[in-house]
């Protein structure tokens, strides 16, 4: 073996300083977006009061100097929306990152292999069912069927695509497209016959955080946090998959097993998010794509970064939706995300770097 | 007898197909000694890539015994194999956004011990690999800006960072022009001395194989045939049978030997003019 020593240290990934900067900025954005979300609104609750209410709720410290209505607005309405936005945004962006690596496609998003269509059919069916069951763990039938529907759809898509020699990515994409189309037809049929419930159905499909509650966060947050932690531990596997499946296998990775694990974890995070927020678009597509261009493709940095920046984006988008008179947040993410994405496409088409 | 890096005994394999399995290897025997450089040739569909996959542990044979470094391959985990065996792919698109040193560091994945940290050992291995592959000056370049020859050296560096005992090459010269083909053969010949590497290379070009390898084996009708090579003359009749065309040896004006497709089995350099 040669004994050539590098004259200076080689950069084998993002440096500690750069990672700290990227993640520090992301964390600051999340906190700033959260603060703005608590303070801004039409009720005229000052920043001081808002901070005191949150501190009081979290620690029990301080005298109560505000009207009860302020506390309800801050703690029962605004805070759950903000925290739900953080959790769902993190989950979607993180899953998007994983699917883009797994499918080796920068246009992949977390909804591609059936999660969105399955969750939609589940939620819409629940909205239209004439039965009213009680809540379970603070979740209504809509959330439960959306969550189950999303996971079930991915399971079906994966089973169909799976052959003797493994699960080819192209087959997975086609299977996802076909199953999604079928489920979407089911959704359309239900919408057609939904009568006066159509508004509720459309509102769910567009995605909204207005129904956020601590109970729903308590359901989705642990699933998303655990999925994220397990995905982050597989950052090397995701990096290896960027070289293609054959080369990943030569780097010692059991590719078929890895596909199942990564798809399962990403689908879990997506379905948990969609269950409490509806199908909010563009976060899972744009955030990983932009971050990869800005900070490079190394998943050791990309995964935590997508979690933070996805959180911040969805909280800001939801604040915009709220201030714009309560339009669905999915409309805002599309309004921000689509033009930005088109600008990126145009820029790369022109060959700029 | 030198230490064996790989040993195949009566190995058979088949392509899965609609009408059952089509046999591709039928009782292949092969012993690869430490430090050997072996060229594997054969017509399209003769099973070269299958054989390489069996050595890499990604294809399971339907029969026979395969041993790596004296241990049956079914007792090796995927990660264990990756710490001893590397495959240098055909020219491959490298993921955009990486710098050369980062891509070469991907070769360290099978050796990773800590969950997140890059260790001193990895930095050393990557620096050595870059230097040995003649790619040290490329370390900070974005991979999207590499030329074809540079990309080939980076791929070699990535394979070396894996610190393999056995290096497998799958038609590594496929997308390279003549100068780069020769440069790659030169690089591999140098690495073999430098790194105590054992090499099995699937090649198409008999001349290149002759230049690189000290043993040439031919796959024909599911069997592996020794065709000479190294200091021994190439068995032209055998090579001709395996490829289905007559192959002849000619001498150029400066005295070097050239293998060429012959005419009725009696070819000369003049026939090619």
Image (cartoon, coloured by chain):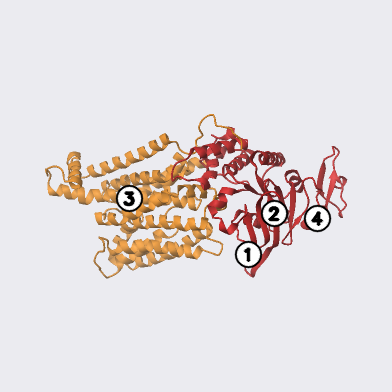
Nearest to N terminus: mark 1 or mark 2: 2
Tag 4's secondary structure? helix
Secondary structure beneath label 2: strand
Cα distance, mark 2 to mark 3? 57 Å
Q: Quadrant of the N terminus of chain A?
A: top right
Answer few, some or many: residues within 10 Å of disc 2's Cα (few below 14, many 20 plus, some between 14 and 19). few
Q: Nearer the viewer, residue B199 or A324?
A: B199
As measured in the structure, the alpha-carbon distance from the residue carrying label 1 to the one carrying label 2 is 19 Å
Among all residues in the image, which is located at the extreme top? A7
Residue at the spot 67% in from the left edge and 41% down from the top edge: B192
Q: Chain of mark 4?
A: B
Say whether disc 4 or disc 1 marks the residue closer to the N-terminus.
Answer: 1
Q: Quadrant of residue B146?
A: top right
Contact, mark 3 vs mark 1 (Cβ under 8 Å): no
The one nearer the camera, A271 or B121, is B121
Q: Which chain is orange?
A: A
- The residue where tag 3 is placed is A87
Q: CA distance from mark 4 to mark 1?
A: 29 Å
Q: Residue tagged by mark 2? A: B31
Confirm whether residue A341 shows in the render: no
Q: Position of residue A49 (x, y in %)?
A: 17, 41
Give the residue at x 80% y 56%. Answer: B238
Disc 4 and disc 1 in contact, CB within 8 angstroms: no
Q: Which residue matches tag 4? A: B240
Q: Position of residue A180 (x, y in %)?
A: 44, 62
- Which chain is rendered red in the image? B
Q: What residue is drawn where x is 54% and y is 64%?
A: A163
Name the front one of labels 1 and 2: 2
Tell me how far mark 2 sits from mark 4, CA to CA. Answer: 24 Å
| Residue A247 place in picture, x, y as percent | 57, 50
Distance (Cα) linking label 3 and label 1: 49 Å
């Amino acid at each position: 073996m040669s004994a050539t020593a590098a004259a200076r240290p080689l950069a084998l990934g993002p440096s500690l300083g750069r990672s700290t900067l990227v993640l520090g900025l992301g964390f600051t954005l999340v906190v700033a977006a959260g603060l703005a979300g608590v303070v801004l609104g039409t009720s005229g609750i000052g920043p001081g009061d808002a901070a005191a209410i949150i501190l009081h709720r979290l620690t029990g410290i301080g005298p109560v100097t505000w009207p009860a209505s302020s506390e309800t607005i801050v703690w029962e309405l605004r805070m759950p929306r903000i925290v739900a936005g953080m959790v769902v945004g993190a989950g979607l962006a993180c899953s998007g990152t994983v699917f883009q690596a797994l499918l080796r496609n920068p246009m992949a998003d977390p909804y591609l292999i059936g999660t969105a269509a399955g969750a939609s059919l589940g939620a819409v069916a629940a909205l239209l069912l004439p039965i009213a069951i009680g809540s379970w763990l603070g979740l209504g039938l809509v959330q439960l069927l959306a969550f189950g529907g999303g996971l079930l759809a991915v399971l079906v898509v994966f089973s169909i695509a799976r052959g003797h020699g493994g699960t080819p990515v192209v087959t997975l994409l086609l299977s996802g497209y076909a199953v999604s189309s079928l489920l979407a037809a089911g959704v359309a049929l239900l919408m057609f016959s939904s009568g006066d419930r159509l508004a509720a159905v459309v509102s769910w499909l567009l995605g909204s955080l207005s129904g956020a509650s601590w109970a729903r966060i308590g359901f989705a947050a642990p699933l998303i946090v655990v999925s994220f932690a397990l995905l982050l531990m597989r950052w090397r596997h995701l990096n290896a998959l960027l070289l293609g499946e054959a080369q990943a296998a030569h780097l010692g990775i059991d590719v078929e097993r890895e596909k199942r694990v990564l798809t399962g974890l990403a689908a879990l995070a997506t379905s948990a998010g969609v269950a409490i927020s509806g199908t909010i678009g563009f976060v899972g597509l744009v955030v990983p794509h932009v971050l990869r261009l800005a900070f490079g493709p190394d998943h050791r940095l990309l995964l935590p970064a997508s979690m933070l920046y996805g959180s911040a984006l969805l909280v800001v988008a939801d604040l915009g939706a709220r201030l714009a008179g309560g339009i669905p947040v999915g409309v805002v993410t599309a309004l921000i995300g689509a033009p930005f994405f088109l600008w990126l496409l145009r820029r790369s088409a022109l060959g700029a770097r | 007898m030198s230490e064996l890096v790989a040993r195949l005994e009566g190995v058979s394999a088949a392509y899965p197909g609609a009408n059952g399995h089509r046999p591709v290897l039928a009782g292949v025997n092969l012993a690869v000694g430490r430090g050997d450089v072996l060229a594997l040739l054969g017509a399209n569909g003769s099973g070269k890539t299958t054989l390489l996959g069996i050595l890499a542990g990604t294809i399971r044979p339907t029969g026979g015994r395969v041993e790596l470094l004296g241990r049956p391959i079914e007792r090796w985990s995927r990660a264990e194999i990756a710490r001893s065996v590397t495959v240098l792919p055909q020219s491959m698109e490298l993921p955009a956004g990486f710098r050369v040193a980062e891509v070469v560091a991907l070769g360290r994945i099978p050796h990773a011990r800590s969950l997140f940290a890059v260790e001193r050992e990895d930095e050393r291995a990557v620096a050595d690999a870059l230097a040995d592959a003649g790619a040290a000056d490329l370390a900070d370049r974005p991979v999207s800006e590499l030329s074809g020859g540079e990309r080939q050296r980076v791929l070699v560096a990535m394979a070396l960072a894996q610190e393999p005992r056995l290096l497998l090459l799958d038609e590594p010269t496929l997308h390279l022009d003549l100068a780069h083909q020769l440069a790659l053969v030169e690089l591999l010949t140098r690495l073999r001395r430098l790194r105590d590497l054992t090499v099995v290379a699937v090649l198409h070009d008999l001349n290149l194989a002759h230049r690189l390898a000290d043993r040439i084996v031919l796959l024909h009708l599911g069997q592996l045939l020794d065709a000479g090579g190294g200091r021994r003359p190439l068995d032209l009749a055998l090579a001709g049978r395996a490829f289905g065309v007559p192959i002849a040896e000619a001498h150029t004006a400066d005295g070097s030997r050239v293998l060429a497709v012959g005419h009725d089995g009696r070819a000369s350099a003049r026939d090619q003019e």
